[in-house]
Image: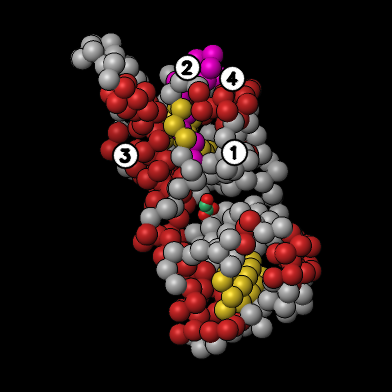
Amino acid sequence: MPIHVLLNCVGDPTRMLVQAGLATDEVIVTPNAAELAASDLHRLIRGATAILAPLTIQIDGDLLDAAGDDLKVVANYAVGVDNIDLEACSTRGVIVCNGPPPMVEPTADIAWALVLATARRLREGITLAESGSWRGYEPDLLLGHRLTGGTLLVVGAGRIGAAVARRSIGWGMTVHYTARSEKPHLHEPPIAASRVTLEEGLPLADAVVLTTSLNSSTRHLMNERTIGMMKPEAVLVNVSRGPVVDEAALAAALRDGRIHGAGLDVFEQEPRIHPDLLTAPNVIVLPHIGSATVEDRTDLTRISVENILAVLAEKEPAFRVRIDPAS
Ligand code: GLV
């Protein structure tokens, strides 16, 4: 009845599971499971009762069938669950859990860092300062754009989007957001946001921050047409999932100076980054580190283990993912 931990969690999930009463040999940790061939992974997880999975492993019907009928729960070490076939889990009676709370603030921090860094051209500034060819202060050197008093558009505002909106208060920004449902708490001061359509919000925004989940309606939401609706002074920041942005269209817009910059923590085919994004001016790329703090990833491990223990004890887990009828 093994519990399979298919990644190198921050913290010690084995200790937590053993403290909860499991035998040490019931917990099998495979840190490099995402690198295994599907056949090896399927062999590994045969007979599992629970799987703690990274977002880099696709949990599909074949994997669930390979695990077999004893599988009760898949805990995703993430908030996004686009790597999981929820339908396939549901038809096999497998409960899916995630861990939203620790993802919110660190991911909003990274989003805000990218907004500031791209609006003010930090990458070009660092490169010049380190190059040895900087000639000293010049009034028009690396001019960015003013954020203070500007407009922020949060695309797909959920918990992370709300945390991004909160950070903008210090910059006195007007906040707009898109979401499938109204978020009354965002309408209250001091955020005082208004809900808009993407088409309404894009032409107004100085910073566009993507925090939406990935599903069939958000894939390539930012494409040649929608990027073309942004102001030339605006920056685009993506901390959600790479495929929300058509990278080729973004690279072309940056190359042609149609937007001011882009800050990206996620990519269409990680770890590959579209080569034109690496050479485009004023792009900052990060290796998917949105929630990467010791404290938050340790919390995520604890939450994941608690989710698994709850399901195995036939209790309701704190963070169960249900199929979203709109996705
Ligand atoms: C990270 O990208 C997550 O979804 O938690």
Q: Which mark is residue 169?
A: 3
In the drawing, does residue 23 fall left or right of residue 297? right
Q: Image check: 292 left or right of 34? A: left
Left or right, residue 162 beside residue 7:
left
In the rendered image, residue 37, in percent from the top left (x then y), is placed at 71, 58
User: In the rendering, which numbered label is found on residue 164?
Assistant: none
Q: Secondary structure at mark 4?
A: helix
Task: Give SS at disc 2.
Answer: loop
Please, what secondary structure does the residue beneath circle 3 have? helix
Does residue 263 show up magenta in the picture?
yes
Between 34 and 93, the one lying in front of the other is: 34
Per the image, the residue denoted by label 2 is 232
Q: Is the residue 138 above or below the residue 230 in the image? A: above
- Residue identifier under label 4: 252
- Tell me, yes or no, if residue 281 can be seen here: yes
Q: Nearer the viewer, mark 2 or mark 4?
A: 4
Q: Residue at x 69, y 49 (%)?
A: 327
Q: Are marks 2 and 3 in contact (CB under 8 Å)?
A: no
Q: Amino acid at mark 3?
A: Ile
Position above or below: 295 against 283: below
Give how far across and how far down residue 28 sits, in percent. 59, 75
Tell me the residue that label 1 is attached to.
272
* Mark 3: C-beta under 8 Å from nearest atom of ligand 1: no
Q: Residue 6's quadrant in the figure?
A: bottom right
- Position in image of residue 91 (x %, y %): 78, 67
Residue at (32% x, 16% y) in the render = 143
- Report the Cα–Cα distance between label 3 and label 4: 32 Å
Report, in whole angstroms, how far the alpha carbon at label 2 lies from the one at label 4: 13 Å
Give amino acid for label 2.
Pro
Q: CA distance from mark 2 to mark 3?
A: 23 Å
* Mark 1 and mark 2: Cα distance apart in space: 27 Å
